[in-house]
C-alpha cells in the first residue's frame, strides 16, 4: 500500500469514528450534483467529515424546488412554504458546529392550517391538540371530536412505529418491516394494510368534510387518497407535531445553508450544467460539465431526480442505475401561482386550503392525467404568521395539483381557463386579489419538467400509490462504486425533511463504504498482497 493511500484510509476511518482530521491529511474530493436541500445537506455532512466538496447547481441560485420568483413586494416562494420535523434541520446545522436559530428566524405557528369549504364552513387546526379537538367539536359535533382524537392517536402511533425502521433506516427491507409488524401486531389494524387512505377515512369520520381534509395529506407526497395506502395517514402527525414559518420565506433556509457551507470552504458553483459522469475501472471518477470542465473526484452524489441516471441524461454509463424509476408511474405535479397583491375576503392564516365541492371528480381527473376541472387549492399567505401585521401588498403562493407531463416546454393551452376557474372559485368564497394575478405568474408541470432533468415535472419522484410503494424507491447506494443518491426521489421520499434525511443516509453510506474499503486494504496488505 502506498504511503498516500494509507493516509487516505486513516482519514476515512477517523471520519467514520467522528474524529477530527489533521489539516495535513489528504482529503478526498466529493462532487455533488444538485444544490437542492438534499445536495446542500450532503455537502454539509461531507464537509464536516473532512471532504473537499464541490456543489454543482444548474440554476442561478441554490435551493432546487425551494425557489422564488421576483415581485415588487420581494421574492415570493414558488415551492415548499413551511418547515416540519424541525429536529432534522437542527441536527443538520449542528454537523457544522452551528445553531439553526443563529442563521434563520423560525416562527412556530399556533394555527397549523385554516380550511374553507364552498358551503361557508371553516375549520382551523392548531399546534395544541386539545384546541384542535375543541375546534372540530364546534365544527362538526361531539362525535366528530371523538373520531378526530382517535385518528390523531392512530397517526401518532404509526409515525412513532415506523420512524426508526423506515424513515431513519438507510435501506429498509420488506422482511425487516414485516418482522417489526409481527412483533407489534397492534400495528396491523392501525396500518389498515388492505385499505386506501380514502377508505380508511370513510371509516374514521362521519363528516365528509373531515374526510376531504385528511385525504389532502396524500397530495403532500404527490398522490391521491383514492389510491394511496392508508398508512399515509401518519403524514398528519408530522404536521401536528409542529409547523414553523421561516421569516422571509423558505429560500432563506437554503441561502443560509449555502453561506454556511462557503464559510466552511465548500465550493458552490451555480449555472453549472452537468453533461455526464465519467467512469474509470467501473467506478465513478469524474463529473464533466457542458462547458468542458472535468472535475475529478473520489465520490459523486447525484442529488437530483434519480430518473436522470436511468434515462441516460447524465451519460450512458449510468443507465443501469435506479432502473425502477424509468418505468414507474410518476407522482403528481402542480401549478403554482406566485404573486403580490392586496387581498379582500376571509381572514387568512399563513397556511390555507380552499376545498372544492367536487372532491371525487378532482382526483378522478388527476388519475386520468387531466387538470382538475374544479380543483381544491392551497393559498400560502407568505406575510402572515410572522407575529407582525402584514403589509398592504402581500406575497401569495397558490398551488393546485396537476398530473406530471412528458416534458414539453410549450405553455399549456388551458392555462388561461385554469386561472379563470380558480379565480371564480375563490370569488365564490369571497376571496379576491387586487391586482388579479395573471398567467405570467404561473409555474406549470411543463416548467418543472424543464427545470429538473428527466423528472417529467413530477415533484415527488415516483408515485406513492400501493402499500409497498415506499420500498420501491432507490436508496443511497448504487451498483456503481463511489456513486450515491440523495433527494426527494430516493428513500425516504418526498418533502423537505425527508429529502434532508436522504442526505444523512447517503453520507453514512459513503463513510461506511470508505472505511470498509480501507480495512479490506489493510487485510490484503497483512496477507502479503499489494494493493498499490
Image (tube, rainbow, N blue to C red):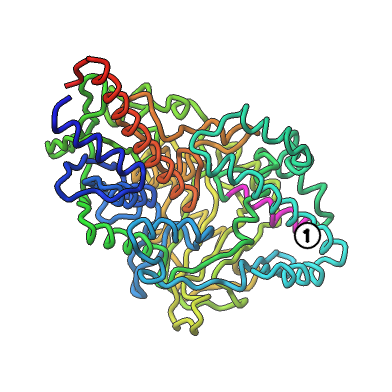
Q: Residue at x 20, y 50 (%)?
A: 269
Q: Which residue lies at the image location 70% right of the left edge and 42% below the top edge?
A: 230
Q: Position of residue 350 (x, y in %)?
A: 54, 71
Query: Looking at the image, is 518 positioned above or below residue 369?
Result: above
Frontmost residue, 173 versus 126:
173
Mark 1 residue element: helix
Which residue does the image show at 82% across and 64% down from the upper left? 145
- Is 198 colored magenta in this rendering? no
Where in the figure is residue 371, as x and y percent of width and height? Answer: 55, 46
Residue 409 visible, this angle: no
Count of residue discs: 1
Q: Which residue is mark 1?
A: 148
Residue 499 visible in the displayed image: yes
Residue 285: quadrant of the picture: top left
Q: Position of residue 129 (x, y in %)?
A: 71, 67
From what the image shows, is residue 141 above or below residue 262?
A: below
Q: Quadrant of residue 304?
A: top left
Of the 4 image quadrants, the one containing the N terminus is top left
Residue 416 in the image: above or below residue 13: below
Could you tell me which residue is drawn at 70 percent across and 64 percent down? 117
Question: Which span is picked out in magenta?
Answer: 208-219
Front one among 412 and 367: 367
Relative horizontal placement of residue 60, taking residue 40 as reference (left or right): left
Horizontally, residue 361 falls left or right of residue 259, namely: right
Query: Looking at the rendering, in which quadrant would you find the C terminus?
Result: top left
Residue 368 left/right relative to 98: right
Image position, residue 152 (x, y; %): 73, 57
Dot 1, how many residues are within 10 Å of its Cα: few (below 14), some (14-19), or many (20+)?
many
Amino acid at each position: 500500500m502506498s504511503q498516500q493511500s494509507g493516509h487516505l484510509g486513516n482519514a476515512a476511518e477517523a471520519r467514520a469514528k467522528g474524529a477530527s482530521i489533521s489539516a495535513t491529511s489528504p482529503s478526498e474530493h466529493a462532487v455533488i450534483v444538485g444544490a437542492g436541500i438534499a445536495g446542500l445537506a450532503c455537502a454539509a455532512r461531507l464537509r464536516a467529515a473532512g471532504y473537499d466538496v464541490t456543489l454543482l447547481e444548474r440554476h442561478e441560485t441554490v435551493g432546487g424546488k425551494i425557489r422564488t420568483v421576483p415581485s415588487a413586494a420581494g421574492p415570493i416562494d414558488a415551492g415548499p412554504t413551511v418547515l416540519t420535523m424541525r429536529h432534522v434541520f437542527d441536527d443538520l446545522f449542528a454537523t457544522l458546529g452551528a445553531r439553526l436559530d443563529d442563521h434563520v428566524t423560525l416562527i412556530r405557528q399556533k394555527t397549523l392550517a385554516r380550511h374553507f369549504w364552498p358551503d361557508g364552513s371553516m375549520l382551523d387546526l392548531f399546534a395544541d391538540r386539545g384546541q384542535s379537538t375543541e375546534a372540530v367539536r364546534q365544527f362538526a359535533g361531539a362525535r366528530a371530536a371523538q373520531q378526530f382524537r382517535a385518528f390523531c392517536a392512530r397517526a401518532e402511533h404509526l409515525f412513532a412505529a415506523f420512524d426508526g425502521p423506515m424513515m431513519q433506516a438507510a435501506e429498509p427491507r420488506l422482511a425487516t418491516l414485516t418482522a417489526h409488524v409481527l412483533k407489534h401486531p397492534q400495528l396491523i389494524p392501525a396500518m389498515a394494510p388492505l385499505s386506501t387512505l380514502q377508505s380508511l377515512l370513510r371509516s374514521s369520520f362521519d363528516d365528509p368534510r373531515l374526510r376531504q381534509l385528511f385525504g389532502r395529506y396524500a397530495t403532500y407526497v404527490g398522490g391521491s387518497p383514492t389510491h394511496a395506502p392508508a398508512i399515509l395517514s401518519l403524514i398528519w402527525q408530522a404536521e401536528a407535531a409542529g409547523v414553523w414559518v421561516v421569516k422571509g420565506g423558505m429560500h432563506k433556509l437554503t441561502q443560509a445553508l449555502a453561506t454556511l457551507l462557503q464559510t466552511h470552504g465548500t465550493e458552490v458553483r451555480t449555472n453549472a450544467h452537468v453533461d455526464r459522469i465519467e467512469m474509470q475501472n467501473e467506478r465513478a471518477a469524474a463529473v464533466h460539465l457542458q462547458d468542458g470542465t472535468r472535475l475529478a473526484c473520489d465520490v459523486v452524489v447525484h442529488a437530483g431526480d434519480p430518473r436522470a441516471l436511468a434515462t441516460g441524461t447524465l451519460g450512458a454509463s449510468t443507465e443501469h442505475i435506479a432502473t425502477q424509476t424509468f418505468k414507474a408511474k410518476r407522482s403528481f405535479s402542480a401549478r403554482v401561482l406566485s404573486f403580490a397583491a392586496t387581498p379582500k375576503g376571509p381572514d387568512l392564516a399563513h397556511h390555507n386550503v380552499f376545498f372544492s365541492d367536487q372532491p371525487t371528480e378532482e382526483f378522478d381527473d388527476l388519475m386520468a392525467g387531466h387538470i382538475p376541472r374544479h380543483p381544491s387549492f392551497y393559498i400560502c399567505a407568505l406575510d402572515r404568521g410572522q407575529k407582525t401585521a402584514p403589509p398592504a401588498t402581500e406575497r401569495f403562493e397558490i398551488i393546485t395539483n396537476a398530473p406530471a407531463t412528458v416534458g414539453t416546454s410549450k405553455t399549456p393551452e388551458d392555462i388561461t381557463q385554469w386561472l379563470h376557474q380558480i379565480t371564480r372559485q375563490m370569488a365564490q368564497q369571497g376571496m379576491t386579489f387586487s391586482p388579479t394575478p395573471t398567467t405570467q405568474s404561473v409555474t406549470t408541470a411543463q416548467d418543472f419538467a424543464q427545470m429538473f432533468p428527466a423528472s417529467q415535472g413530477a415533484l415527488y419522484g415516483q408515485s406513492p400509490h400501493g402499500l409497498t410503494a415506499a420500498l420501491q424507491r432507490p436508496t443511497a447506494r448504487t451498483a456503481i462504486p463511489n456513486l450515491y443518491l440523495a433527494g426527494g426521489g430516493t428513500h425516504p421520499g418526498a418533502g423537505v425533511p425527508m429529502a434532508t434525511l436522504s442526505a444523512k443516509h447517503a453520507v453514512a453510506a459513503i463513510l461506511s463504504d470508505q472505511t470498509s474499503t480501507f480495512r479490506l486494504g489493510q487485510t490484503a496488505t497483512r496477507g502479503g498482497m499489494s494493493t498499490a
